[in-house]
Amino acid sequence: MHLKTLCALIAAASALTACNKSETQAEVQHDVAKAQAEGQRDVADARADAKEENADADKNVADATADHDADDVAEQARDANETAAKGNSKIVVAQAEAAHKVAVEKCESLTGAPQKECKDDADETLDQAKEAAKANR
């Protein structure tokens, strides 16, 4: 019984130390390049979505204007402004998440406490960027 417990503790300790193991420089460079490519795609997708949503909102404003309904024009204009703000926020968050992925991959070249600190800093930077995007919206 004690042997099973001891084996379980050793396995758990091994698993935990493997989490802070540094990767080779080549592995880090590969992972960073992959994260950069994924981040660029995510940002491009966010921009495309925002552009499409803005076009739809602008069309609604144009339709309301064509109908000569001042109240509807004002409402659609407010909605268009809100849509633009949301789109900008999504882009900023996508950029922050892309930068976060790259930063975390760069942390993989470190070991132990410095690696954890690096990842914690990356997480904090991401959280701050998300809060700033939310506040600006």
Image: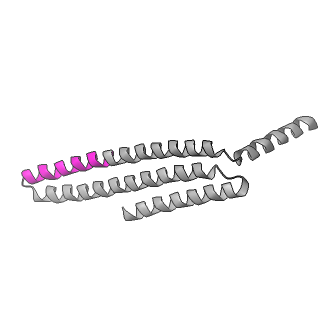
The image quarter in which residue 77 lies: bottom left
The location of residue 78, given as percent across then percent down, is 23, 59
Image point 81% across, 39% down: which residue? 11
> In this picture, which residue range is highlighted in magenta?
49-68
Q: How many marks?
A: 0
Please state which of residues 72 and 65 is positioned toward the viewer in this rendering: 65
| Left or right, 106 with reference to 60 | right
* 62 is within the stretch colored magenta: yes
> Which image quadrant: the C terminus?
bottom left
Image point 67% across, 54% down: which residue? 115
> Which image quadrant: the N terminus?
top right
Image point 10% across, 54% down: which residue? 65
Residue 57 visible in the shown view: yes
Indicate the colouring scheme: one colour
The location of residue 120, given as percent across then percent down, is 62, 58
| Left or right, 60 with reference to 51 | left
The image quarter in which residue 18 lies: top right
Compared with 52, 115 (above or below) is below
The location of residue 113, given as percent across then percent down, is 71, 57
Specify the principal SS of the magenta part.
helix
Residue 1 visible in the shown view: no
